[in-house]
């Protein structure tokens, strides 16, 4: 079937900011006279490392999808012309992907990221200045009349940029104006246990497994996570995470490795979200909320992951009350904390520090410490020691007085 000429195609792009329930998502629906001709829904972000005026150091930033994008140059394509999606983030960043029809298939190819280091707001102190082009050489063939789906995070390390894509729902060259119900699922979604990701991450990928609690589990590595709203950092989190799962009466412990875990999120006036993803965790959400316009707290945790037996594990709890601190401050707990999300799911945190609101200059504000870290805890053993000391002295004095009275009694006799 031949589609209408590109010049007759109407372009519709819907950008959805999904708040605290999900992270920022793009939905592109290109239409022609027959209906939808290209449909795409996905999420993405980019971690860019660049040289700065300080020659001894480099700076790394994460570029997330902002709340406003343009789509100039997008087109449906036809039998002779490639389809294309083009997204622009203001003047500093743009992104494109091409689709070419080949007999009974279509090819996804030429995924290109452009960013301009001359933009001092997005790339402060960058040298040299100019437009940088990063082309992803990966290609994928999908049968016609089939939707390509991939919920897992696809990570491409294309130095100096690490690209993350997830939540993909895509069909090019849609037939008869209606998105197909046939699906092709990516290999990462089919891999559910102990297999290292095929794609590269910011560090060498390592196989992650669920470990029975009878085997000693090391303390998890501490990860640093930051979410941006446009050009401004709006959420900071530093923590080591250990997931404790009891499935069919068998307990397992799962350490999250930051080097093979991707993250995204969103910030709203009353809510903020941090979402983690890796080869076994489809998503782990930490959702924060404001209460009484004075304090913030962790209100909700959602997890969807695969267990060692291949089954999916899903838990949601939106009635939590952890990590409570005043707005304008951060919450800190260096000692191990246990967050009980449900009867079968707990999260142990180590060296925790979070600030989901009112982040200034990309840095943590003064922290409110958890009770376990408070200096008052040191007074407890001291007080116990002092009390025991006084008790020993009192017993000794009583003993001496009793002994003295005994000797006096013997003399009178």
Image: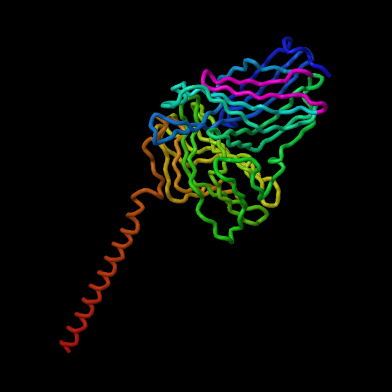
Q: Residue at x 57, y 43 (%)?
A: 260
The residue furthest left is 412
Q: Position of residue 328 (x, y in %)?
A: 40, 32
Q: Residue at x 68, y 14 (%)?
A: 11
Q: Is residue 117 left or right of residue 150?
A: left
Give the overall secondary structure of the magenta segment.
strand
Picture quarter with the N terminus: top right
Q: Determine the image quadrant of residue 409.
A: bottom left
Q: Which residues are magenta?
A: 79-104
Q: Residue at x 41, y 37 (%)?
A: 330
Q: Position of residue 352 (x, y in %)?
A: 45, 44
Q: Residue at x 75, y 19 (%)?
A: 37
Q: Nearer the viewer, residue 337 or 224?
A: 224
Q: Is residue 33 left or right of residue 339?
A: right
Picture quarter with the C terminus: bottom left
Q: Position of residue 52 (x, y in %)?
A: 42, 30
Residue 15 against residue 357 in the figure, above or below: above
Q: Position of residue 246 (x, y in %)?
A: 62, 53
Q: Nearer the viewer, residue 257 or 159?
A: 159
Residue 80 against residue 239 in the figure, above or below: above
Residue 381 against residue 351 in the figure, above or below: below
Q: Nearer the viewer, residue 354 or 128?
A: 128
The stretch drawn in magenta includes residue 102: yes
């Amino acid at each position: 079937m031949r589609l209408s000429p590109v010049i007759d195609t109407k372009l519709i792009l819907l950008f959805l900011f999904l708040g605290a329930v999900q992270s920022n998502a793009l939905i592109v629906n290109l239409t022609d006279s027959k209906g939808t001709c290209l449909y795409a829904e996905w999420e993405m972000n980019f971690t860019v490392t660049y040289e700065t005026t300080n020659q001894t150091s480099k700076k790394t930033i994460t570029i997330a999808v902002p709340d406003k994008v343009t789509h100039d140059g997008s087109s449906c394509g036809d039998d002779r012309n490639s389809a294309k999606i083009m997204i622009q983030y203001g003047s500093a960043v743009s992104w494109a992907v091409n689709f070419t029809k080949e007999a009974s298939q279509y090819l996804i190819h030429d995924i290109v990221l452009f960013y301009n280091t001359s933009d001092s707001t997005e790339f402060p102190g960058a040298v040299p200045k100019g437009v940088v082009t990063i082309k992803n050489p990966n290609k994928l063939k999908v049968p016609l009349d089939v939707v390509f789906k991939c919920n897992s995070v696809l990570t491409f390390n294309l130095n100096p940029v690490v690209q993350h894509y997830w939540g993909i729902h895509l069909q090019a060259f849609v037939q008869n104006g209606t998105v197909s119900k046939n699906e092709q699922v990516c290999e990462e979604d089919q891999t559910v246990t102990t297999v290292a990701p095929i794609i590269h991450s910011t560090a060498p990928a390592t196989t992650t497994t669920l470990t029975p609690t009878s085997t000693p589990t090391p303390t998890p590595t501490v990860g640093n996570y930051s979410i941006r709203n446009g050009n401004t950092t709006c959420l900071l989190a530093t923590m080591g995470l250990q997931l404790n799962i009891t499935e069919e009466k068998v307990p397992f412990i799962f350490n999250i490795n930051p080097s093979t875990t991707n993250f995204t999120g969103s910030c709203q006036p009353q809510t903020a979200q941090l979402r983690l993803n890796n080869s076994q965790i489809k998503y782990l959400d930490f959702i924060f909320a404001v209460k009484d316009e004075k304090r913030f707290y962790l209100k909700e945790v959602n997890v969807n992951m695969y267990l060692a037996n291949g089954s999916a594990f899903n838990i949601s709890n939106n009635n939590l009350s952890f990590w409570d601190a005043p707005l304008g401050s951060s919450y800190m707990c260096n000692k191990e904390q246990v967050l009980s999300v449900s009867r079968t799911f707990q999260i142990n945190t180590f060296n925790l520090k979070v600030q989901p609101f009112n982040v200034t200059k990309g840095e943590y504000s003064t922290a409110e410490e958890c009770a376990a870290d408070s200096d008052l805890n040191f007074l407890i053993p001291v007080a116990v020691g002092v009390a025991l000391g006084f008790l020993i002295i009192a017993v000794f004095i009583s003993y001496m007085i009793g002994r003295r009275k005994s000797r006096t009694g013997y003399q009178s006799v």
